[in-house]
Image: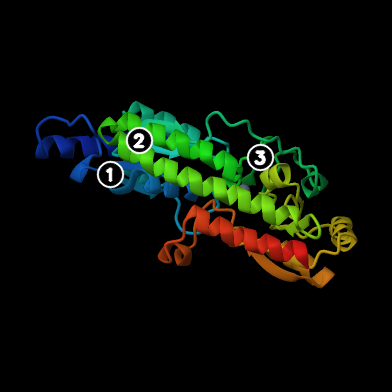
């Protein structure tokens, strides 16, 4: 990290010099070219909410490339330089982004406002009641660079907590740009209503489900267990790069058969090798859930939003829980 900071400082210095030679004086609002705030974000829901709330006054960008794994991504020094030019850096702060706390410290020193979108939310502990506890050798619990620590960071998948995140984002935009407070508040209220109705859809659909268990590759869905009473059996926790032991495989297969699981649920940004072995073993079909840590190029092209992708997730759940 030391070396990284040095490179960054050198790069920032170069930019500073370039800026000085081309224009006199610095502006109060760093990134406000063409009158817009520039906000750098991480996981997709933060980018999407910032866009929705900011409307035409905000340029919101995620530093994550398509299909990035939120937990292991590290920004390049070029990206860091760009972020230092922004007005704010908003990340979840739930522990999903391994790089973010250090990066936030660096950016703060450059005068960038840094915000944790999940501030004020009590995170679930991820003691791994299910498959996670079956493989804790090395205690670091780092499957394929996917370290979940002792809190479940996937808080954005809960439509109720998502409202709190949206509020924190709204407050950030208002404090950076009070002139457009009314617009930001109006956009936030609209988003909040959509999130409330999404929560209602989840409640209605999941309360009617025939059974409660889903078999997923990566244990990202603890917040749905708590909020909606479903149960995830997860394959990861068994490292994605390792073959599962015969005993571990047998346990998952036994659980899946006990609950008459017909589907194994994969994710586009998580390795699926081990899960596929299990899918074959129990003769299940496959489905895909979107954990929204990042978005695929295809979904980005289609203009999908947090709400539209969560509705797809609910359809997927409905299939998995009613067959
Ligand atoms: Zn994850």
Label 1 belongs to which residue?
Answer: 57
Quick check: 29 above or below 268?
Answer: above
Closer to the N terminus: mark 3 or mark 2? Answer: 3
Crowding around mark 3 (Cα neighbors within 10 Å: few <14, some 14 to 19, many 20+) is many
The mark closer to the camera, 3 or 2, is 2
x 58%, y 32%: residue: 121
Disc 2, SS: helix
Label 3 belongs to which residue?
Answer: 152
The mark closer to the camera, 1 or 3, is 1
Quick check: 284 above or below 238?
Answer: below
Crowding around mark 1 (Cα neighbors within 10 Å: few <14, some 14 to 19, many 20+) is some
Q: Is mark 1 within 8 Å of ligand 1?
A: no
x 32%, y 47%: residue: 55
Relative image position of residue 148 (x, y in whole percent): 65, 41
Relative image position of residue 45 (x, y in whole percent): 49, 48
Quick check: 296 above or below 148?
Answer: below
Q: Check whether the beta carbons of the residues at disc 2 and disc 1 lie within 8 A of each other.
A: yes
Name the foreground residue: 163 vs 291: 163
Label 2 belongs to which residue?
Answer: 173
Closer to the N terminus: mark 2 or mark 1? Answer: 1
Name the foreground residue: 266 vs 172: 172
Mark 1–mark 3 Cα distance, whole angstroms, equals 33 Å
Is residue 271 in view from this perspective?
no
Which image quarter: residue 279?
Answer: bottom right
């Amino acid at each position: 990290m030391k070396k990284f900071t040095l490179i960054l400082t050198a790069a920032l210095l170069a930019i500073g010099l370039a800026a000085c030679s081309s224009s006199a004086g610095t502006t109060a609002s760093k990134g406000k070219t063409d009158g817009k705030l520039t906000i750098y974000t991480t996981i997709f829901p933060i980018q999407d909410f910032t866009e929705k709330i900011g409307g035409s006054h905000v340029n919101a960008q995620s530093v994550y490339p398509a299909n990035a794994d939120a937990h292991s991504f590290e920004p390049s020094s070029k990206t860091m330089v760009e972020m230092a030019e922004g007005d704010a850096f908003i990340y979840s702060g739930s522990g999903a982004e391994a790089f973010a706390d250090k990066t936030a410290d660096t950016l703060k020193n450059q005068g960038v406002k840094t915000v944790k979108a999940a501030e004020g939310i009590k995170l679930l502990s991820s003691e791994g009641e299910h498959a996670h506890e079956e493989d804790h050798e090395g205690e670091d619990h780092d499957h394929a660079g996917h370290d979940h620590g002792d809190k479940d960071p996937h808080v954005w998948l809960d439509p109720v907590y998502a409202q709190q995140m949206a509020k924190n984002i709204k407050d950030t935009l208002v404090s950076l740009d009070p002139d457009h407070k009314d617009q930001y508040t109006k956009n936030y209220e609209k988003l909040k209503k959509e999130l409330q109705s999404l929560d209602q859809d989840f409640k209605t659909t999941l309360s009617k489900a025939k059974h409660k268990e889903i078999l997923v590759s990566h244990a990202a869905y603890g917040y749905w267990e708590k909020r909606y009473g479903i149960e995830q059996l997860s394959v990861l926790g068994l490292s994605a790069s390792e073959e599962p032991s015969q005993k571990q495989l047998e346990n998952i297969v036994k659980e899946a058969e006990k609950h008459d699981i017909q589907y194994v649920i994969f994710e586009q940004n998580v390795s699926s090798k081990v899960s596929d072995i299990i899918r074959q073993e129990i003769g299940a079909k496959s489905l895909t859930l979107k954990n929204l840590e990042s978005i695929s190029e295809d979904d980005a092209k289609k203009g999908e939003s947090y709400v539209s992708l969560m509705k797809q997730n609910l359809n997927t759940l409905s299939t998995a829980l009613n067959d």
